[in-house]
Image (spheres, helix red, strand yellow):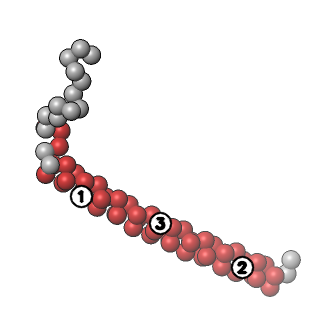
Amino acid sequence: MNPEDRLIAIETKIAHQEDLVESLNQTIYSQQKKIDQLEDLFSALVRRIKESGGADRQPSSENERPPHY
């Protein structure tokens, strides 16, 4: 393989690697956006549970089993 062909092969590999790195960066960016959305949703749900009394509330009588169970 002559030096010019080697140089072309190396440049081609570098171009493919740059495309792959950009694709991976986009994937990571998208995943981080989704994680941020899920964290916001989780925080909102935690606030909502705390505001409604959460686990401290007594179960309603309709959810309790009758004494004979």
The answer to which image quadrant residue 69 occupies is top left
Secondary structure of the residue carrying tag 1 is helix
Q: Which residue is mark 2?
A: 12
Relative placement, left or right, of 27 versus 66 is right
What's the residue type where badge 2 is placed? Thr
Q: Nearer the viewer, mark 3 or mark 2?
A: 3
Q: Which residue is mark 1?
A: 44
* Mark 3 and mark 1: Cα distance apart in space: 24 Å
Q: Are marks 2 and 1 in contact (CB under 8 Å)?
A: no
Secondary structure of the residue carrying tag 2 is helix
What's the residue type where badge 1 is placed? Ala
Q: How many marks?
A: 3
Q: Which residue is nearer to you in this view: 32 or 45?
A: 45
x%, y% of residue 12? 72, 79
What's the residue type where badge 3 is placed? Ile
x%, y% of residue 50? 15, 49
Q: Are marks 3 and 2 in contact (CB under 8 Å)?
A: no
Per the rendering, the mark at residue 28 is 3
What residue is rendered at 19% in x and 49% in y?
Answer: 49
Badge 2 density bin: few <14, some 14–19, many ≥20, Cα 10 Å: few
Mark found first going from the N terminus, 3 or 2: 2
Mark found first going from the N terminus, 3 or 1: 3
What residue is rendered at 75% in x and 82% in y?
Answer: 7
